[in-house]
Image (cartoon, rainbow, N blue to C red):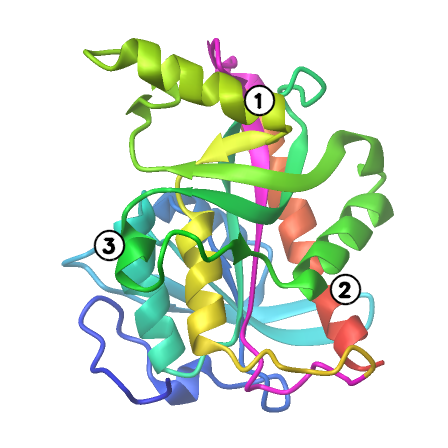
Amino acid sequence: MHGAIDPHHILLTPDQVAGNQGRGRFFLLPGSPTRAQELSEMFTEVTEVVHNPRGHTAYLGVLDVDGERLDVASIATGMGTPSVGIIVTELLAQGATRLLRVGTSGSIQPEVKLGDLVIATGAVRDEATSDAWLPREFPAVAHQDWIEALSRAAIGLDLGQHAFAGVVHTKDAFYGREFPMGPLKAQNQAYMETLAAAGVLASEMESSHLFVLGQVHGRNAVPVGAPTASPNTVKMGAVFAVVGTLDGLGPADARKAAEARMCEVGVRSLVELARMERR
């Protein structure tokens, strides 16, 4: 994928994306520009690559934790799969291979409470963007290394009892689908009830297309016993803070606390992934 397109929505170059002994920078992908900046406050040696017309400023830095020194970055993707598709495709074109979505979600299961975390193992493709890449029958799954790294991070931060791993729901319509309203209210409500009955954990708006892009652009035919540190192996993952339920959003202070925990787990998972790749 490297060099296949000329990016128009980000200003990063291949040299800025490079690092980590050939694996490239680890990218944290929030939807919000504010959260991208907040994540950068956990880095050192931060450089801003400003993109004023679109607001997709990238924050390049170093993560120095527990003896690990990693080249990292945060950049906002915006909301929804169309925006994710643009930003992530341009990052992949510049050589990025390790990308982690850090976002918010609404719980679908009663066991998953406000303030909990959800680690996506896969996503329901209830959106249209990824249809331009693969038929709907093709599954959208996270890379197994991110699932393990995020799980280790949550346990290491004593959040294991408040983190759930499983399938999430990616939709195009926040109002209408997740919060049923309008002429198709009854159908949308029935759809969400079907997902709940199937055990889908939470609903969000980006990860299914992220996972599809990871499959399309990655070289993932790696034997299970082989190291997976190759830069040619594209790894996509996602972790979400639960900030509401099907009844609506939680209080602002509870949402903010959940987002802070999610960011902490996301950043810590970079360290866990780096250690796993050296095994």
Please give the name of the residue rendered at 40% of the width and 55% of the height, measured from the top-left corner.
Answer: 209
Q: Amino acid at mark 1?
A: Ala
Please give the name of the residue rendered at 49% of the width and 47% of the height, measured from the top-left corner.
Answer: 38
Q: Quadrant of the C terminus?
A: bottom right
- Residue 55's label in the rendered image is 3
Q: Amino acid at mark 2?
A: Glu
**Cα distance, mark 1 to mark 3?**
35 Å
**Cα distance, mark 3 to mark 2?**
30 Å
Mark 3 Cα-neighbour bin, 10 Å: few <14, some 14–19, many ≥20: some
- Find residue 43 and report its image quarter: bottom right
> Under tag 1, what secondary structure?
helix
Which region of the structure is painted magenta?
A: 226-254
Q: Earlier in the sequence, mark 1 or mark 3?
A: 3
Q: Amino acid at mark 3?
A: Gly
Residue 71 or residue 102, whichever sits in front: 102
Residue 68 part of the magenta segment: no
Mark 1 Cα-neighbour bin, 10 Å: few <14, some 14–19, many ≥20: some
Residue furthest front in the image: 137
> Under tag 2, what secondary structure?
helix
From the top left corner, tell me how far across and down residue 51 is, in percent: 23, 64
Q: Which residue is mark 1?
A: 196
Please give the name of the residue rendered at 23% of the width and 82% of the height, measured from the top-left corner.
Answer: 5
- Find residue 263 and report its image quarter: top right
Asked whether the viewer can see residue 108, the reply is no
**Vertical relation: 85 (above or below) 112:** below
**Cα distance, mark 1 to mark 2?**
31 Å
Q: Which residue is mark 2?
A: 272
- Find residue 72 and report its image quarter: bottom right
Residue 237 part of the magenta segment: yes
Q: Is residue 154 left or right of residue 12?
A: right
> Under tag 3, what secondary structure?
loop
